[in-house]
Amino acid sequence: MRTAFFPGTFDPVTLGHVDVVRRAAALFDKLIVAVAVNTSKEPMFSLEKRVEMLKRTCSGIANAEVISFEGLLVDAIEKYGVVTVVRGLRAISDFEYEFQMAMMNREINAKFETVFLMPSPQYSFVSSRMIKEIVSLGGDVSPFVPGIVMDEMGARR
C-alpha cells in the first residue's frame, strides 16, 4: 500500500490545503493528513479544533485519515511507516524553505521521499497566515476557506 503523509499546522485549513489533499489522495492508496504541533507559532485554533475541522473537511475523501503529531517529522514518518511526504508549494519562496526542510529530513532519515504538489491556480496565493490577517482586520475570507472554518471563525468573533 502506497501511503503518503501531508503534514502542516493547518491554522486554519484553507481551500488550498483541501485542494492538495484531494490531489494527493488521488495519487496514493492512503493519505495521512497530519496536523502538527508547532511551538514556534501562536495558533488561532487549538490542535483539537484544527484536527476536527480537517476531519470534517476531508470526510468525503475515503482514503484520507487525519491525525495529529508532535515532534520531528522524521519520527512521525517512522512511526506510521510512510515512505512519501507531500508538501504544497505556492510560490518560489515556499520552494526555498521546503527544499531545505526536505534535504534536512533526508539527511536525518533517507527512507522516505518528499513530493511537492502545487495547488490549483485559484489557490496559489492563499495562505493560513494571510487568512488570519484578513480576519483580524474584519475582511471576508469565505472564498478561501471551507465553510466549517467560516463557522468556527464566526463563533470566535
Image (cartoon, rainbow, N blue to C red):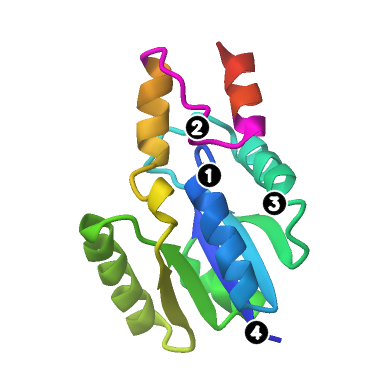
Residues in magenta, as a range: 137-149
Q: Is residue 140 visible?
A: yes
How far apart marks 2 and 1 lie (CA) works out to 8 Å
Residue of label 1: 15
User: Residue beneath label 4, please?
Assistant: 2
Mark-to-mark CA distance, 1 and 3: 11 Å
Q: Amino acid at mark 2?
A: Pro
Q: Is residue 98 left or right of residue 63?
A: left
Q: CA distance from mark 4 to mark 3?
A: 19 Å
Position of 125 compared to 120: left or right? left
Per the image, the residue denoted by label 3 is 58
Callout 4 secondary element = loop
> Circle 2 is placed at which residue position?
143
User: Tag 3: Cα neighbours inside 10 Å, few (<14), some, or many (≥20)?
Assistant: some
Q: Residues within 10 Å of mark 4 (few under 14, many from 20)?
A: few
Q: Quadrant of the N terminus?
A: bottom right
Which is closer to the viewer, label 4 or label 1?
A: 1
Q: Mark 2 to mark 3: distance in Å?
A: 18 Å
